[in-house]
Amino acid sequence: MTEAAPVPAPAPKKDPLKAFRGIMAGTLILEVIVVALALPVIAKLHGGVGTLVGWVAFGFIAVFIAMCAFVRRPWAIPAVVGLHVLLIATWILLPALGVIGVIFGLVWTYMLWLRKDLLKRMAEGRLPSQQQQQT
Protein backbone atom coordinates (compact mmCIF):
# COMPACT_ATOMS: atom_id res chain seq x y z
CA MET A 1 0.00 0.00 0.00
CA THR A 2 1.49 3.28 -1.10
CA GLU A 3 0.73 6.47 0.69
CA ALA A 4 0.63 9.74 -1.17
CA ALA A 5 3.21 12.30 -0.22
CA PRO A 6 1.80 14.89 2.14
CA VAL A 7 0.71 18.05 0.40
CA PRO A 8 2.65 21.03 1.71
CA ALA A 9 0.54 23.62 3.43
CA PRO A 10 -0.01 26.78 1.43
CA ALA A 11 2.01 29.81 2.42
CA PRO A 12 0.28 31.76 5.14
CA LYS A 13 -1.55 34.87 4.07
CA LYS A 14 -0.28 38.21 5.25
CA ASP A 15 -1.69 39.11 8.62
CA PRO A 16 -3.03 42.67 8.50
CA LEU A 17 -3.36 42.70 12.27
CA LYS A 18 0.41 42.23 12.65
CA ALA A 19 0.98 45.88 11.71
CA PHE A 20 -1.77 46.90 14.11
CA ARG A 21 -0.06 45.00 16.92
CA GLY A 22 3.12 46.94 16.14
CA ILE A 23 1.20 50.20 16.42
CA MET A 24 -0.20 49.05 19.77
CA ALA A 25 3.28 48.25 21.09
CA GLY A 26 4.61 51.56 19.79
CA THR A 27 1.81 53.44 21.52
CA LEU A 28 2.60 51.66 24.78
CA ILE A 29 6.25 52.72 24.46
CA LEU A 30 5.17 56.31 23.83
CA GLU A 31 3.11 56.08 27.00
CA VAL A 32 6.16 54.85 28.90
CA ILE A 33 8.09 57.90 27.70
CA VAL A 34 5.31 60.32 28.65
CA VAL A 35 4.79 58.79 32.11
CA ALA A 36 8.57 58.86 32.63
CA LEU A 37 8.52 62.55 31.74
CA ALA A 38 6.02 63.03 34.56
CA LEU A 39 8.62 61.84 37.08
CA PRO A 40 10.21 65.31 37.48
CA VAL A 41 6.75 66.72 38.20
CA ILE A 42 6.25 64.02 40.81
CA ALA A 43 9.66 64.77 42.33
CA LYS A 44 8.89 68.49 42.49
CA LEU A 45 5.34 68.24 43.86
CA HIS A 46 5.61 65.22 46.13
CA GLY A 47 9.11 65.48 47.54
CA GLY A 48 10.82 62.85 45.42
CA VAL A 49 10.08 59.83 43.31
CA GLY A 50 10.37 57.50 46.30
CA THR A 51 6.88 58.46 47.43
CA LEU A 52 3.66 56.55 46.76
CA VAL A 53 2.97 58.56 43.60
CA GLY A 54 6.50 57.87 42.33
CA TRP A 55 6.13 54.14 42.87
CA VAL A 56 2.75 54.19 41.13
CA ALA A 57 4.35 55.92 38.12
CA PHE A 58 7.20 53.39 38.07
CA GLY A 59 4.62 50.61 38.27
CA PHE A 60 2.78 51.95 35.24
CA ILE A 61 6.06 52.25 33.34
CA ALA A 62 6.95 48.62 34.10
CA VAL A 63 3.50 47.29 33.23
CA PHE A 64 3.31 49.24 29.96
CA ILE A 65 6.72 47.86 28.93
CA ALA A 66 5.63 44.34 29.87
CA MET A 67 2.37 44.70 27.92
CA CYS A 68 4.39 45.26 24.73
CA ALA A 69 5.31 41.57 24.87
CA PHE A 70 1.69 40.49 25.16
CA VAL A 71 -0.10 42.59 22.52
CA ARG A 72 -0.84 39.50 20.43
CA ARG A 73 -2.69 37.75 23.26
CA PRO A 74 -6.51 37.89 23.20
CA TRP A 75 -6.63 39.44 26.67
CA ALA A 76 -4.21 42.27 25.84
CA ILE A 77 -6.78 44.83 24.70
CA PRO A 78 -9.02 44.47 27.78
CA ALA A 79 -5.89 44.64 29.95
CA VAL A 80 -4.73 47.85 28.26
CA VAL A 81 -8.20 49.37 28.67
CA GLY A 82 -8.15 48.41 32.35
CA LEU A 83 -4.70 49.97 32.77
CA HIS A 84 -5.99 53.21 31.32
CA VAL A 85 -8.95 53.23 33.66
CA LEU A 86 -6.46 52.86 36.52
CA LEU A 87 -4.23 55.57 35.04
CA ILE A 88 -7.19 57.95 34.88
CA ALA A 89 -8.06 57.02 38.47
CA THR A 90 -4.62 58.24 39.56
CA TRP A 91 -6.03 61.73 39.08
CA ILE A 92 -6.70 61.54 42.83
CA LEU A 93 -2.97 61.14 43.57
CA LEU A 94 -1.58 63.38 40.85
CA PRO A 95 -3.72 65.18 38.26
CA ALA A 96 -0.83 65.11 35.75
CA LEU A 97 -1.01 61.30 35.57
CA GLY A 98 -4.79 61.50 35.21
CA VAL A 99 -4.43 63.89 32.28
CA ILE A 100 -1.96 61.50 30.65
CA GLY A 101 -4.50 58.73 31.17
CA VAL A 102 -7.29 60.75 29.54
CA ILE A 103 -5.17 61.71 26.54
CA PHE A 104 -3.91 58.19 25.90
CA GLY A 105 -7.39 56.83 26.62
CA LEU A 106 -8.63 58.90 23.70
CA VAL A 107 -5.75 57.63 21.55
CA TRP A 108 -6.64 54.02 22.40
CA THR A 109 -10.33 54.66 21.74
CA TYR A 110 -9.44 55.85 18.24
CA MET A 111 -7.09 52.91 17.70
CA LEU A 112 -9.77 50.41 18.75
CA TRP A 113 -12.23 52.08 16.38
CA LEU A 114 -9.65 51.66 13.58
CA ARG A 115 -9.19 48.00 14.56
CA LYS A 116 -12.95 47.45 14.40
CA ASP A 117 -13.02 49.01 10.91
CA LEU A 118 -10.07 46.85 9.81
CA LEU A 119 -11.79 43.67 11.01
CA LYS A 120 -15.00 44.69 9.23
CA ARG A 121 -13.14 45.35 5.98
CA MET A 122 -11.30 42.02 6.34
CA ALA A 123 -14.60 40.17 6.74
CA GLU A 124 -15.99 41.90 3.65
CA GLY A 125 -12.85 41.16 1.61
CA ARG A 126 -12.18 44.83 0.87
CA LEU A 127 -8.51 44.99 1.92
CA PRO A 128 -6.01 45.59 -0.91
CA SER A 129 -4.23 42.32 -0.06
CA GLN A 130 -7.51 40.45 -0.58
CA GLN A 131 -8.13 41.81 -4.07
CA GLN A 132 -7.59 39.61 -7.11
CA GLN A 133 -4.65 40.43 -9.36
CA GLN A 134 -5.72 41.26 -12.91
CA THR A 135 -3.58 39.80 -15.64
Image (cartoon, rainbow, N blue to C red):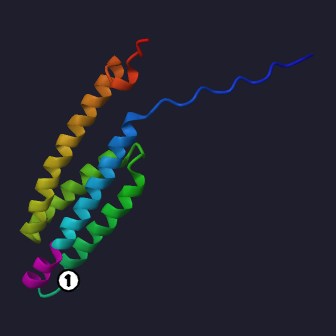
Q: In this image, 43 relative to 13: left or right?
A: left
Whether residue 42 is in magenta: the answer is: yes
Give the structural element (helix, strand or loop) at label 1.
loop
**Residue 58 figure quarter:** bottom left
Q: Which residues are magenta?
A: 38-46
Q: Mark 1: which amino acid?
A: Val
Q: Is residue 85 above or below residue 21?
A: below
Q: Residue at x 38, y 34 (%)?
A: 16
For label 1, the residue is 49
The N terminus appears in which quarter of the rendering? top right
On the image, the x and y values in percent for residue 41 come to 10, 77
On the image, the x and y values in percent for residue 2 come to 89, 17
On the image, the x and y values in percent for residue 45 come to 7, 82
The mark tally for this picture is: 1
Q: Residue at x 14, y 83 (%)?
A: 43
Q: Residue at x 8, y 61 (%)?
A: 99
